[in-house]
Image (tube, rainbow, N blue to C red):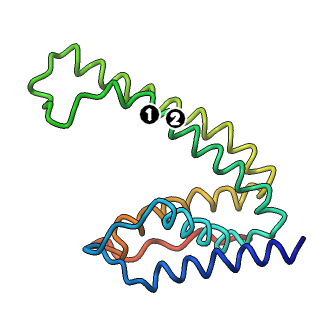
Amino acid sequence: MKKLGLLLMMFLMIGSASVLAQGQGPKDQKMSKEEKDAKMIGFLTEKLSLTSEEAKDFWPVFNEMKDKLKENHKSFKGEKPGKDVKLDDMSDEEVRELIDNGFKMMENDIAIKKEYNEKFINILGVKRTAKLYHLEKEFKKNMKGEGHGPQGPPPPAPEED
């Protein structure tokens, strides 16, 4: 079983390395969802030092949470005005409804994240769960700029005791 886990992590790292080796910069073709997901899997697996047993428990829970968050966002997407509609062209009531729906979506996101926080703690422990949230932000920040942008490099992840 350990060999299977190590083999899986090796494939993920090789896949991530090949994506990086292709030289996809900000001006090149955008990274596919699959490539981005593979890169995130490798990044989080390495930075959280997931064992094969932890990875087996962690990734289905993590993916389930991401799916629920995506569904939550999709459920509110139809309630947003089109890109060509400007706030100035909307009535105050329409704008207020838009704002309220945005808050509802964020509240739902928080409820989903709270639910999965306990599951992550059971798998990773408290400190690595906190580290997970920091690493997710760091990964997203790095993906946006594929570099460090004007803000400089991302801050280091919190240290484990």
Residue position for label 1 = 74
Q: How many marks?
A: 2
Does the CB distance between marks 1 and 2 fall below 8 Å?
yes
**Closer-to-camera residue (39/119):** 39
Answer few, some or many: residues within 10 Å of disc 2's Cα (few below 14, many 20 plus, some between 14 and 19).
Answer: few
Report whether 93 appears left or right of 19.
left
Q: Is residue 123 above or below residue 36?
A: above
Residue type, numbered disc 1: Lys
**Closer-to-camera residue (134/76):** 76
Report whether 145 appears left or right of 86.
right
Q: Quadrant of the C terminus?
A: bottom right
C-alpha distance separating marks 1 and 2: 5 Å
Q: Quadrant of residue 127?
A: bottom right
- Provide the secondary structure element on which disc 2 rests: helix
- Provide the secondary structure element on which disc 1 rests: helix
Q: Position of residue 96 (x, y in %)?
A: 27, 19
Mark sitting on residue 71: 2
Q: Residue at x 75, y 45 (%)?
A: 119
Q: Residue at x 52, y 35 (%)?
A: 71
Answer few, some or many: residues within 10 Å of disc 1's Cα (few below 14, many 20 plus, some between 14 and 19).
Answer: few
Q: Residue at x 67, y 69 (%)?
A: 45
Report whether 125 appears left or right of 84.
right
